[in-house]
Amino acid sequence: MIQLFRLSKSFGPSTALSDLTMRVHKGEFVFVSGPSGAGKTTLLRLIFGSEKPTSGHILINGINLSRINRSKLDLLRRSVGFVFQDFKLLPAKTVFENVALALQVIGYRRTFVRKRTHQCLKLVGLAEKEKAFPLQLSGGEQQRVAIARAIVKNPLILLADEPTGNLDPDLTEDIMVLFKTINMKGATVIIATHSRELLKGGAQRTISLIRGRIVGER
């Protein structure tokens, strides 16, 4: 499903990723691990299409992101959900509105938007908070809103950047159960994390980055 060939990304004189080659199959659950500055966020942004590689190629379902125009890239990104590290919720909109917006901008009908948004908020355990505003929620609740927004389009690929970085152990466990549930429903899930606790004893495939290079995999 996702193929990277000799992928590199530089920002001026700084190299974020160097000569990455890897493949993620449909339906896999993959951790990308490494310390801060290892290139994890950059890798996710490249897969999402919000950054372009300096060299190399990214293929999503056989489509080379470097060789398609902006409109086709936007269409492809509709099948990819992204959970941002800092949530990126709109503070002036309610929980329901934050999640629904992802469907409204695509042009779905109001009845479908309402039904699908309710479904996703129920899945993440926030059906009773749909009229609340982000600043009225805890960090864990805001993270779950961000997850609901990412999955409301029923994406084939779900990317998450340090989704448990600011959460306590109990909330972390709840969030990981959500990701595993989404994966079991058929989505390919890639989670970037520096948390050793999150990786302990996991059966999921883990790709380790240091200074922009793959240094191990299990």
Image: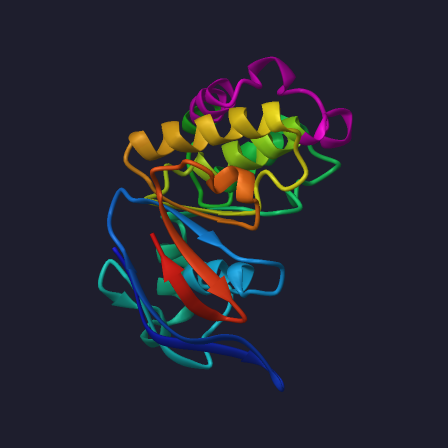
User: Relative to 128, does residue 7 appear above or below in the rendering?
Assistant: below
Residue farthest bottom in this picture: 13
Could you tell me residue 7's position as x and y percent?
A: 39, 75
Asked which quadrant contains residue 143, the reply is: top right
Structure colour scheme? rainbow
Q: Nearer the viewer, residue 83 or 114?
A: 83
- Residue 103: x and y in percent read 47, 38
Query: Can you give x and y, in whole percent of width and height, for residue 158 in the image?
Result: 41, 44
Q: Is residue 110 visible?
A: no
Query: Magenta: predominant secondary structure element?
Result: helix
> Residue 107, image x and y in percent?
44, 42
Q: Which residues are magenta?
A: 115-139
- Residue 98, magenta (yes or no): no
User: Up-down: is 125 above or below 189?
Assistant: above
- Nearest the eye: 131 or 138: 138
Side of 124 where 94 appears, left or right:
right
Residue sitting farthest toward the front? 201
What residue appears at the point 50 percent right and 71 percent down from the top-left corner?
Answer: 212
Quarter of the image where the N terminus is located:
bottom left
Q: Residue at x 59, y 31 (%)?
A: 145
Res. 167 in view: yes
Q: Nearer the viewer, residue 211 or 11?
A: 211
Q: Residue shown at 66%/29% (left/top)?
A: 168
Q: Is residue 78 above or below residue 41?
A: above
Q: Is residue 186 above or below residue 205?
A: above
Residue found 24% across the figure and 58% down from its top: 61
